[in-house]
Amino acid sequence: MKKTKKFKLIWYVMTGVYLIWMLDFMRWDTYAVQNTLLEKPMYPNYVAYYLWVIISTVIFLIYPDLIRRIYLAENVTKRLKTFNLVLLITGCVYITAYGFLKNPLEYTASMMGLYYPWLFKLWCVFAGLSIFTNVALMYRKFDYKNDVGIILTSIGCAALFVTVNVPSAGEELIMTLQCLSHWSTALIFAFLGAAGVVIFLVHKCREKNKKFIVLTAVFCAVLALMLVLLVVVGKNGLIENLPMWAAYIVLFLVNYTDIFTDKKAIVKK
């Protein structure tokens, strides 16, 4: 009960900050055409903007309930496990399909968001929820209690909503508050989302589980490869999606196959 209240408090505080930011600092026409690379405003009118504020706020409030039902649950039901699997597959398929709406060698997800702002919002929703719920399931399946990993992943998913609400400014406006807000929160999601996975994998490595040692090495190698490619090649949609694809594969293998089955696994079959 105490842990449930703690996670609720964290998410309620982040929700409150988000609402204040959206209703006070942000305005539905904050990023007009002349202030960004947008070909047209993100929202046709204030009604659409406030509709998104309501929808995104409701999504914020879903997260603490997911923590209660998955990470803190005595048992995870088969129905909820199936829901997580569907969400994982949907998230992977969606971000992949979205990434090919334009040439992924030239456009990142954020850049595509300048042309498809509402599809980018769905990218945010699917990416955050699919990673978060399956990280929580991974912890619960192996009876791994690490609130830090859940909190870091929570902060990363919340930060993603800043990324999607503040459009990419492009390299021409690189030192503006808009650009720094967009890029920094995108990096927070990437690093904290990966941190939730890495924390668990390192824990299993300390148990000298050879399969997890190999899995951890491969996952970290993919992350390192992405950083190298960013320096050598520069950013693009394919490089940007590498850690996401790697995370989806890891979560699928750990949560839904018997390859890494542990005697401590207590999820209902």
Image: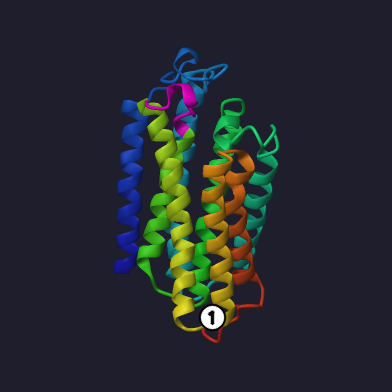
The reply, left or right, for residue 221 in relation to residue 105 is left
Q: Position of residue 40 (x, y in %)?
A: 56, 16
- The tally of labels here is 1
Looking at the figure, which quarter contains the N terminus?
bottom left
Which residue reaches farthest front? 232
The stretch drawn in magenta includes residue 170: yes
Q: Secondary structure at mark 1?
A: loop
Residue found at x 53% / y 56%: 223
User: Residue 74, percent across and down?
Assistant: 46, 76
204 above or below 33? below
Segment tinted magenta in the rendering: 165-175
Q: Position of residue 135 (x, y in %)?
A: 51, 63
Q: In the rendered image, which quarter is residue 210 located in?
A: bottom right
Which quadrant of the figure contains the C terminus?
Answer: bottom right
Identify the image's colour scheme: rainbow, by chain, secondary structure or one colour.
Answer: rainbow
Provide the residue designation for mark 1.
Answer: 266
**Is residue 171 rendered magenta in the image?**
yes
Q: Check the image and report above or below for 19 versus 139.
A: above
- Residue drawn where x is 45% and y is 48% of the image: 189
* Residue nearest the viewer, comparing 250 with 75: 250
